[in-house]
Image: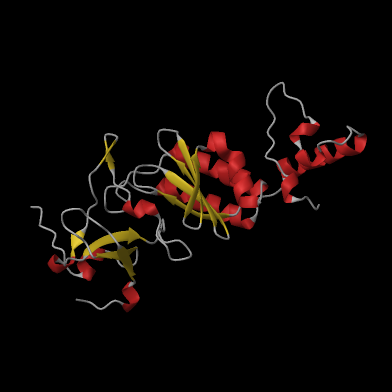
């Protein structure tokens, strides 16, 4: 099914929430017709049931392999990556795949953290998952710094930055 | 015992290359390779390195199947200024 990139939101149901046309910018300003309702349902179906790309599967497999790293795996005293950080990184890769964000690289850090990097042309983004459950999102274009924030607050900025 | 780092010294640091790989597909190295460890939540001041005049590439890399060696050049000893690094690929690297 052809779905334009701009139409794909990472829509997640919350208890008690409803689906509104405003949740889908591409349909904003249109009437709430049966056709549009069908489109929304189609998009939701696409989001929730689309199989993962092979690339995403490979990155997830690589992330999960970090669980087996022993302490001092880098010979400089690195900690075993945090299970929570890995789990959140896997979650991001799944979400990113649905949103057509191109994962480029994943790696564990020396202090239990994990990074997921995205790249499109000169645009680069890195999301760090720390072992204290915090996140850090950094956007760069070439050598120019664009934004520093958190995944929780700036995911839409990541989407816009990489996919526009 | 800590050694004095001279301006002419090259510094060597291992970078993991297999499970996980710190070298990206474009051959750049992730900043994790230069991230200090934290002890009780406090980052160490500096990174562990070998001084090339006291070792060999062979000894410094420990396991050439699993690591690559980064060589830092143009190091000033008072304030450590790293202006360039080279990844020494073991396949083409002379044994010293």
Residue A16: x %, y % from top left: 72, 21
* Residue A32 falls left or right of residue A61: right
- Which residue occupies the extreme top position in the image? A16
Answer above or below: position of A46 versus B68.
above
- Depth order, front residue of B3/A61: B3
Answer above or below: position of B15 versus A20.
below
Answer above or below: position of B67 versus A65.
below
> Number of callouts in the render?
0
Q: What residue is at 23 percent from the left and 70 percent from the top?
A: B58
Residue A98: x %, y % from top left: 67, 46
Q: Quadrant of residue A10?
A: top right
Answer above or below: position of B73 versus A145.
below
* Residue A116 falls left or right of residue B62: right
Q: Quadrant of residue B94?
A: bottom left
Q: What residue is at 55 percent from the left and 59 percent from the top?
A: A122
- Which residue occupies the extreme left position in the image? B1
């Amino acid at each position: 099914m052809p779905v334009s990139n701009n139409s794909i939101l990472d829509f997640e149901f919350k208890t008690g929430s409803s689906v509104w046309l405003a949740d889908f910018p591409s349909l904003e300003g249109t009437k709430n017709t049966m056709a549009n309702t069908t489109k929304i349902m189609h998009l939701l179906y696409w989001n929730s049931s689309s199989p993962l790309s092979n690339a995403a599967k490979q990155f997830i497999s690589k992330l999960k392999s970090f669980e087996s790293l022993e302490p001092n795996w880098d010979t400089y005293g690195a900690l075993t990556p945090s299970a929570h950080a890995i789990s959140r990184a896997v979650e991001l890769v799944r979400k990113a795949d649905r949103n057509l964000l191109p994962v480029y690289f994943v790696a564990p850090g020396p202090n239990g953290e994990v990074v997921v990097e995205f790249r499109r042309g000169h645009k680069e983004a890195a999301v760090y998952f720390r072992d204290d459950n915090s996140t850090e999102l950094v956007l760069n274009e070439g050598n120019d710094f664009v934004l520093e924030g958190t995944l929780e607050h700036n995911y839409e900025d990541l989407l816009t930055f990489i996919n526009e | 015992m800590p050694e004095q780092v001279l301006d002419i010294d090259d510094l060597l640091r291992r970078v993991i290359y297999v499970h996980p790989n710190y070298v990206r597909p474009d051959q750049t190295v992730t900043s994790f390779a230069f991230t200090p460890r934290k002890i009780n939540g406090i980052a160490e001041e500096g990174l562990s390195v070998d001084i090339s005049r006291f070792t060999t590439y062979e000894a410094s890399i420990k396991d050439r199947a699993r690591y690559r060696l980064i060589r830092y050049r143009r190091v000033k000893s008072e304030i450590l200024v790293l202006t360039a690094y080279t990844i020494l690929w073991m396949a083409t690297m002379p044994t010293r």
